[in-house]
Amino acid sequence: MDNVKTKLPEFEKPLTEIDKRIKELTGKDKGGAKYRKLIKKRKEIAEKIFSNLTSWQKVQLARHPDRPHTLDFVKGIFDSYEEFHGDRHFGDDKAIVGGPAKLGGNTVFFVGNQKGRETKDNIKRNFGMAHPEGYRKALRMMKLAEKFSFPVITFIDTPGAYPGVKAEERGQAEAIATNLKEMMMLKVPIIVVIIGEGGSGGALGIGVGDRILMLQNAVYFVCTPEACSSILWKDASMAETAADNMKLEAEDLKKLGMVDEIIKEPAEAAHRDYSQTFENLKKRLVHHLGVLKRTNPENIFQQRYKKFREIKFYKYE
């Protein structure tokens, strides 16, 4: 897989350092002149950092180790939920989570990529890279939702589907292709939310929907910037240059018609304010569910098909 390392972004270090100094003063000189000066300086630094982020910096934010993952959103947005396991064919892929949940009095089914936090958890979740059984588990959730006429909400956050030999032997490409076909024809509303990285077919395997929402600092790409730079320049260190040319930001994708709505993140990004991030997304999910539930189930997949056929081609300038 692409050489992707998750670490604290360099551009955020000045903010981290001043936060430590502020914390040291808390309880000693809180409210004093030195404390107030640091608070003012911190605000200036934060505004400078987050007001003009580059594409590569947004990639780093999308991968931030403290950024909320799918189960964080599930716990923060839904009133209650139950996680189902297994694909009923091979096993339970922990890189994909899903099950029924309650949202504003409505029952929905959620499906999402799940990354880990610590090393042990990341190994358990395979760094959010699903095997074929993960996509088949996702499809099982969606078919259950269709059977009981419940909407589906998917959360995308993966660098890509797992490309290992065992995954290929068990039909990785077929599993993703089947999901693309079945999601296109599903007769219940589907809302897709890109919350972090949206990587290649790994994202598309749960990425077909009636509404595509994307968090402000999330990214969506055909391959990671590291992989792109390795292909084009035979040099993974050119990832920043690749990111700047890949049109992977939410604003670019909305212009192309691939994203319907950008969900605003807190001033210092999602990882610094979970509750505000959850509140912003929850409001829009409730809104879109209300609109989609009024759509005739017999027509919904036809509208979905038309939506994807009308996505614009990008012309390089």
Image (tube, helix red, strand yellow):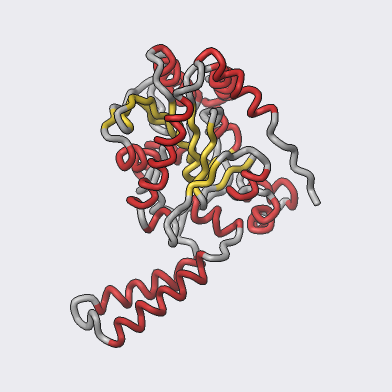
Residue in view at x 57 percent, y 39 percent: 260
Residue 219 visible at all: yes
- Horizontal and vertical percent for residue 82? 28, 27
Res 171 visible: no
> Furthest residue to the right?
317
Where residue 35 appears, as percent x and y from the top left, is 29, 82
Q: Is residue 261 left or right of residue 223?
A: left
Q: Which of these two is toward me, 169 or 195?
A: 195
**Vertical arrangement, residue 35 with respect to residue 197, above or below:** below
Which residue is farthest bottom?
33
Residue at 67% in and 56% down:
244
Residue shown at the point (52%, 48%) measured from the top left: 218
The quadrant in which residue 91 appears is top left
Residue 266 drawn at (x, y percent): 42, 57
Q: Please state if 107 lies on the left or on the right of 264 as rendered.
A: left
Asked if residue 238 lies left or right of residue 288, the reply is right
Residue 142 picture quarter: top left
Front residue of 9 and 25: 25
Q: How many numbered badges does the structure rendering display?
A: 0
Pick the quarter of the image with the N terminus: top right
Where residue 148 sits, quadrant-wise, is top left
Q: Is residue 28 above or below residue 214?
A: below
In depth, the one of 231 and 289 nearer the eye is 289
**Going 41% across and 16% down the picture, which residue do you hit?**
149
Q: Is residue 125 above or below residue 61?
A: above
Q: Position of residue 50 (x, y in %)?
A: 50, 64
